[in-house]
Image: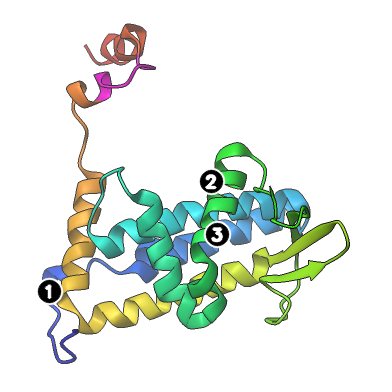
């Protein structure tokens, strides 16, 4: 349980999701929309960006920066914080992450699947801001359309970050987890760690060595 009167140490003041994450995210999204407008390309780009930040927020919230269970941590953040904005996130956070982060972000296309009655469920992206339409399913004889507003999702994520900040202000354990994960994420890797990947060739490290010797 959070300690409501838990004082914030001086060195904890430098760790703030609003300045570390929210404000840079807002600036980046603003630039994308300024350049591309509100076309499909802009929203595709923003969706990738949002799930990248949700991965980061899940890591910071848990205090665990390991690659294992990254998706589980991200879904935990969706359920815990976006779920307080709209309970549909708490109910379907895992589905959204699997279909959009694993599908759209990693495979370049949002996931789709065949339901038990043989109909295909596909995502339909919209700019609607109506809460009742976002995260709703439109039914037809042969197809199901899952209505997803990237604009609403973006605004909900910003509000969720504010809620996370509010929790951090009264819970030292959240601040400690945030600081621990942040330090781990920003710690330089070593040569052994880099070599521990099949796609790293001698030429990769040689490219660096040739320029620093």
Q: Is residue 2 left or right of residue 89?
A: left
- Secondary structure beneath label 3: helix
Name the main secondary structure of what is drawn in magenta.
loop
- 3D distance between C-alphas at marks 1 and 3: 40 Å
At horizontal 47% and vertical 51% (from top left) the residue drawn is 52
Q: Which residues are magenta?
A: 194-200
Please name whichever residue, 175 or 33, is drawn nearer the observer in this view of the structure. 175
**Callout 2 environment at 10 Å: few (<14), some (14 to 19), or many (20+)?**
some
Residue that sits furthest to the front in the current view: 117
Which comes sooner in the sequence, label 1 or label 2? 1
Please name whichever residue, 212 or 98, is drawn nearer the observer in this view of the structure. 98
Residue at image mark 1? 10
Which comes sooner in the sequence, label 2 or label 3? 3
Residue that sits furthest to the bottom in the current view: 5
Q: Is residue 171 left or right of residue 89?
A: left
| Residue 208 can be seen, yes or no | yes
> Residue 120 appears at what percent x and percent y?
76, 52
Image quarter for residue 127?
bottom right
**Callout 3 environment at 10 Å: few (<14), some (14 to 19), or many (20+)?**
few
Q: Which mark is residue 158?
A: none
Q: Which mark is residue 102?
A: 2
At horizontal 29% and vertical 65% (from top left) the residue drawn is 61
Evaluate if marks 1 and 3 touch, with contact meaning CB atoms under 8 Å apart: no
Evaluate if marks 2 and 3 touch, with contact meaning CB atoms under 8 Å apart: no
Q: In the rendered view, would you say 73 is above or below 84?
A: above
Please name whichever residue, 100 or 145, is drawn nearer the observer in this view of the structure. 145
> Residue 69 appears at what percent x and percent y?
33, 49
Residue at image mark 3? 95
């Amino acid at each position: 349980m959070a300690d409501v009167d838990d004082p914030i140490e001086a060195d904890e003041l430098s760790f703030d999701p609003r300045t570390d994450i929210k404000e840079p995210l807002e600036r980046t999204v603003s630039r994308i929309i300024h350049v591309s407008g509100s076309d499909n390309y802009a929203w595709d780009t923003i969706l990738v960006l949002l799930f990248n930040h949700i991965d980061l927020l899940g890591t910071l919230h848990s205090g665990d920066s390991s690659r294992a269970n990254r998706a589980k941590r991200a879904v935990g953040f969706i359920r815990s914080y976006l779920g307080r904005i709209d309970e549909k996130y708490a109910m379907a956070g895992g589905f959204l992450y699997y279909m959009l982060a694993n599908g759209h972000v990693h495979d370049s296309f949002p996931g789709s699947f065949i339901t038990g009655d043989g109909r295909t469920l596909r995502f339909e992206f919209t700019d609607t801001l109506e809460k009742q339409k976002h995260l709703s399913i439109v039914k037809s004889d042969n197809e199901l359309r899952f209505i997803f507003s990237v604009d609403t999702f973006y605004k909900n994520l910003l509000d969720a970050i504010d809620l996370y900040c509010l929790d951090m202000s009264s819970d030292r354990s959240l601040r400690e987890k945030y600081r621990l994960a942040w330090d781990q994420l920003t710690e330089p890797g070593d040569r052994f760690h880099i070599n521990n990947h099949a796609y790293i060739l001698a030429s990769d490290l040689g490219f660096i060595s040739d320029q620093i010797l």
